[in-house]
Amino acid sequence: MSLEKQIKFLKRKGIGLGTRLKDGRKIYIYMVNDLFVEVHYQNDNSEEPAEKLNMITGLMNLTQYLERDFRATF
């Protein structure tokens, strides 16, 4: 599936959980069932095309990923 189609699916079927800042960029986080997806949009605007996705399966994996990322910033 193309990146554009993946984003359309996420926006249609997923739940937007919020955003976070990393390296001065705004990252949007979506959930579809047990899949969590971070999306980087052009100009940090969810109305712009997506630049890349990062998929994480399971809440435990998401928690570990975010904790590692948080620790790496200090």
Image (cartoon, rainbow, N blue to C red):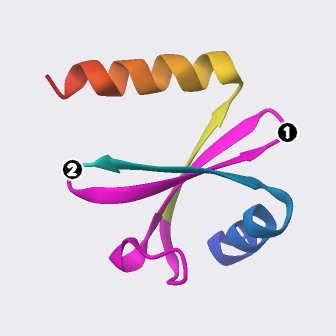
Q: Quadrant of the C terminus?
A: top left
Badge 1 amino acid: Asn
Q: Residue at x 33, y 27 (%)?
A: 69
Q: Quadrant of the N terminus?
A: bottom right
Q: Please state if 59 lies on the left or on the right of 46 as rendered.
A: right
Which type of secondary structure does the marked residue at label 2 adopt?
Answer: loop
Residue furthest out toward the left: 74
Q: Which residues are magenta?
A: 24-51
Residue 1 visible at all: no
Q: Residue at x 66, y 77 (%)?
A: 4
Closer to the N terminus: mark 2 or mark 1? Answer: 2
Q: Residue at x 57, y 26 (%)?
A: 62
Near-viewer residue (55 or 23)? 23
In the rendered view, tell whether residue 7 sits above or below residue 72: below
Which secondary structure type mostly characterizes the magenta part of the structure? strand
Give the labeled residue for mark 2.
23
Give the labeled residue for mark 1.
33
Q: Residues within 10 Å of mark 1 (few under 14, many from 20)?
A: few
Decide whether residue 73 is among the magenta residues.
no
Q: Position of residue 54 (x, y in %)?
A: 53, 47
Q: Residue at x 66, y 40 (%)?
A: 36
Badge 2 amino acid: Asp
Decide whether residue 29 is among the magenta residues.
yes
